[in-house]
Image (tube, helix red, strand yellow):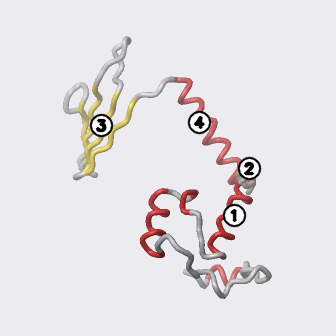
Amino acid sequence: MIPETETRFYQKAVDTEIEFSGADAHGKATQLTRHQGAAVTTGTRIDEAELKRSADAAAAMAKRVKDQTPMPGSQAALRQMLEGWRLGQPDDSVMAPNLGAAVRRRYGAGPFSVVSGFSRTRKPSRSPASVSNRR
């Protein structure tokens, strides 16, 4: 990063400009604004307690992923969602907002059939060949 002023920096390689603004009681910046191309991203300074909570949550997630441990309640939620799809009535209120909106646009509000052909007894193949052939 190359300083332009005391609060503004830029990087030529990726056409990025960062500006620090606002000040707390100790004179530290309270906001960061990043300009990259047409995109503008802002961020607000967080305190040490929030930083620790965020770091702890990230560490817990990394451990859960490494240990391949599901999030509590996730299996039941997935089963409920799949059952709704099987019945042709997915509960889009439990989906991410963009996904729920896409489901409503694609299928409307009424029952529909998208899961025909799937059965509860058939399990997907986990052989290395089946995974590598999907690329």
Callout 2: few (<14), some (14-19), or many (20+) C-alpha neighbours within 10 Å? few
Task: Tell me how far mark 4 sits from mark 2, CA to CA.
Answer: 20 Å
Q: Position of residue 70 (x, y in %)?
A: 73, 55
Callout 1: few (<14), some (14-19), or many (20+) C-alpha neighbours within 10 Å? some
Q: Of callouts 3 and 2, which one flags the residue occurring earlier in the amino acid sequence? A: 3
Mark 4, residue position: 55
Task: Tell me how far mark 1 sits from mark 4, CA to CA.
Answer: 31 Å
**Left or right, residue 39 beside residue 130:** left
Q: Of callouts 3 and 4, which one flags the residue occurring earlier in the amino acid sequence? A: 3
Mark 1, residue position: 80
Mark 2, residue position: 72
**Type of amino acid at the residue the image marks with label 1:** Gln
**Residue in the picture at 28% in, 26% down:** 21
Q: Is the C-beta separation of discs 4 and 2 under 8 Å?
A: no
Mark 3, residue position: 33
- Closer to us: mark 2 or mark 1? 1
**Residue in the picture at 59% in, 68% down:** 90
Q: Quadrant of the N terminus?
A: top left
Q: Of callouts 3 and 1, which one flags the residue occurring earlier in the amino acid sequence? A: 3
Q: Position of residue 51 (x, y in %)?
A: 54, 30
Q: Is the C-beta separation of discs 2 and 1 under 8 Å?
A: no
Q: Which mark is residue 51?
A: none
The answer to whether 28 is drawn above or below residue 72 in the figure is above
